[in-house]
Image (spheres, helix red, strand yellow):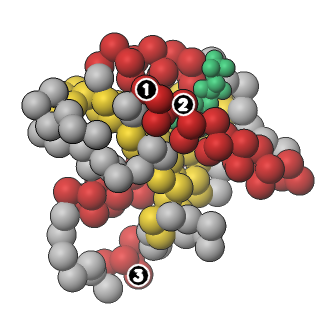
């Protein structure tokens, strides 16, 4: 996608998972399948962190497209307590290679993150990139939600 000249708008929110434990894996697979297909068509990229009963999602793209998509996601009954954490124009896409990366500490994650901040601090990543900085922020947002 060659849109380097276009401003990139990003939006970050946090929400509470509302999925029955026995249906969770299938429901998440469904969310990712639809999200990737639709985001690809919309020129949206991003990442969805799933940890315990918390979602933290980053959406990147054209502002009106991202805001419209956020309104759809906000109304989705598979989560609740949807709270906007950050929104604005950023210098570049952080997850430009992903229509929707799955982030977490489970083995299904595209981008693994260590959710224990003490373990993470003891083994810092060798290279600090904007993506790593964003992933760290996502982890903190998720941990704040459970008061951890
Ligand atoms: C936590 C969560 C994240 C989601 N992320 C996306 C996403 O990135 N892109 C997307 O198209 N749909 C996403 N969805 C699904 C949307 O809420 C919606 O079901 C989907 O876009 C289809 O909407 P439509 O039938 O109105 O086209 C997400 C849903 C949840 C619960």
Query: Who is closer to the viewer here, 58 or 110?
Result: 110
Q: CA distance from mark 1 to mark 3?
A: 37 Å
User: Of tags 1 and 3, which is closer to the observer?
Assistant: 1
Query: Residue drawn 48% across and 46% down?
Result: 100
Query: SS at mark 2?
Result: helix
Query: Residue drawn 27% across and 80% down?
Result: 124
In the image: residue 49, left or right of residue 45: right
Q: CA distance from mark 3 to mark 2?
A: 36 Å
Q: Quadrant of residue 43?
A: top left
Query: Where does the image place residue 59, in percent across and percent down from the top left?
Result: 39, 35
The image quadrant where one finds the N terminus is: top left
Query: SS at mark 1?
Result: helix
Query: Where does the image place residue 133, in percent across and percent down from the top left?
Result: 24, 59
In the image: residue 65, left or right of residue 134: right
Q: 126 above or below 35?
A: below
Query: SS at mark 3?
Result: helix
Q: 82 above or below 112?
A: above
Residue designated by label 2:
38
Query: Residue drawn 80% across and 50% down?
Result: 26
Residue designated by label 3:
119
């Amino acid at each position: 996608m060659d849109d380097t000249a276009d401003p990139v708008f990003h939006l970050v929110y946090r929400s509470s998972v509302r999925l029955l434990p026995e249906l969770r894996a299938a429901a998440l697979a469904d969310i990712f399948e639809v999200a990737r297909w639709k985001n690809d068509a919309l020129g949206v990229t991003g990442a969805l962190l799933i940890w315990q009963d918390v979602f933290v999602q980053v959406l990147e793209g054209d502002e009106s497209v991202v805001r419209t998509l956020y309104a759809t996601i906000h109304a989705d009954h598979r989560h609740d307590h949807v709270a906007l954490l950050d929104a604005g124009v950023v210098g570049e896409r952080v997850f430009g290679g992903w229509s929707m990366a799955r982030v977490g500490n489970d083995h299904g994650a595209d981008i693994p993150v260590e959710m224990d901040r003490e373990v993470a601090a003891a083994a810092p990543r060798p290279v600090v990139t904007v993506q790593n900085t964003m992933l760290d922020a996502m982890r903190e947002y998720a941990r704040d939600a459970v008061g951890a």
